[in-house]
Amino acid sequence: MKQVVAGNWKMNVTATEAEAFAAAFEPQGLGAELLLFPTALAFGALARAVAGRGIEVGVQNIHWESSGAFTGEISAEQAAAAGASHALIGHSERRHLFGETDEEVGRKVSAALRAGLTPVVCVGETLDERKAGRVDEVITRQIDAVLGMVSAETRWRIAYEPVWAIGTGETATPDDATAAHRTLRTRLVERLGGGAAQAVPILYGGSVKPGNAAELLAAPEVDGVLVGGASLDPASFRAIAEAAG
Ligand code: PEP
């Protein structure tokens, strides 16, 4: 399986800046599956600028309803109609800053699949939860909330992103990442069967940079990376992608 290198631009990058990124980013020679998550306002500009260049574009969040009176929200169907291939769901900033619950994450995964989007489901423990030895319990609970929405045939991805490592400069060690990914993989095997479980890429996210990408991408069970800050610069996003197989 190709490794996945995904960039989450969060609330950064205007449409004009997205076009400049696309002009500066050189995808040639990269073997990884490349994916970018701009804001909804920069989505169209980026999708047009990278069309046909081997980079997929997704949205950072969706609502679970397909349309209606939900001011400020975007539906999975609208994202798909605009050309999105993927939807980031349950990012820790959504969970912790905006109060998104496991139940809402599950509903969003259903909505993404209904609209033909590939969900990228984010899970991860806080520092307090890690210190309390609760990593496996927390990430198993978070993944269980979506396992009822997927089948062995579903195309989806998981991103393990320890909350304490996101945007902090702190990175999980490759061993930490492997241990958490093994917990998730074991759960997938139990619920979906071995073959299907192996087909779900599990990405690591949390302060991935050009300097640490190679060792994280080489760790057992790490099928790719989800990159925040370091994906904003075309050269550093390319350097990370070069480390992927
Ligand atoms: C993220 O936003 O998913 C992320 C991992 O951010 P950063 O790489 O900046 O820690």
Image (tube, rainbow, N blue to C red):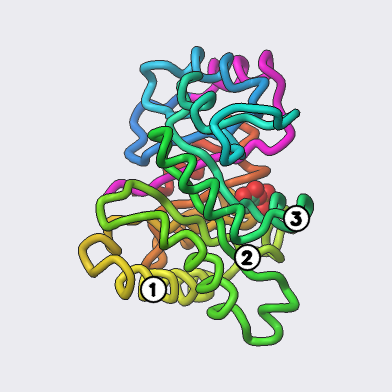
Depth check: give the residue in front, 109 or 214. 109
Residue shown at the point (67%, 21%) measured from the top left: 41
Depth check: give the residue in front, 18 or 29. 18
Q: Which residue is mark 2?
A: 162
Mark 2 neighbour class, 10 Å CA radius: few under 14, some 14 to 19, many 20 or more:
many
Residue 115 position within the rendered picture, expressed as x and y whole percent measured from the top left: 43, 33
Task: Identify the mark nearer the N-term, 2 or 3.
Answer: 3
Task: Identify the mark nearer the N-term, 3 or 1.
Answer: 3
Q: Which residue is mark 1?
A: 187
Residue 84 position within the rendered picture, expressed as x and y whole percent measured from the top left: 47, 27
Residue 85 position within the rendered picture, expressed as x and y whole percent measured from the top left: 43, 31
Q: Is residue 81 left or right of residue 161?
A: left
Task: Give the vertical position of 10 relative to 153 (above or below).
Answer: above
Depth check: give the residue in front, 180 or 80. 80
Disc 3 to disc 1, how far (Cα)? 25 Å
**Marks 2 and 3 in Cβ contact (< 8 Å):** no
Amino acid type, callout 3 = Gly
Start-end of magenta stretch: 1-25
Instruction: Kindly report which numbered mark, 3 or 1, lies closer to the viewer in this rendering.
Output: 3
Amino acid type, callout 2 = Pro
Residue 188 position within the rendered picture, expressed as x and y whole percent measured from the top left: 35, 68
Mark 3 neighbour class, 10 Å CA radius: few under 14, some 14 to 19, many 20 or more:
few
Amino acid type, callout 1 = Arg
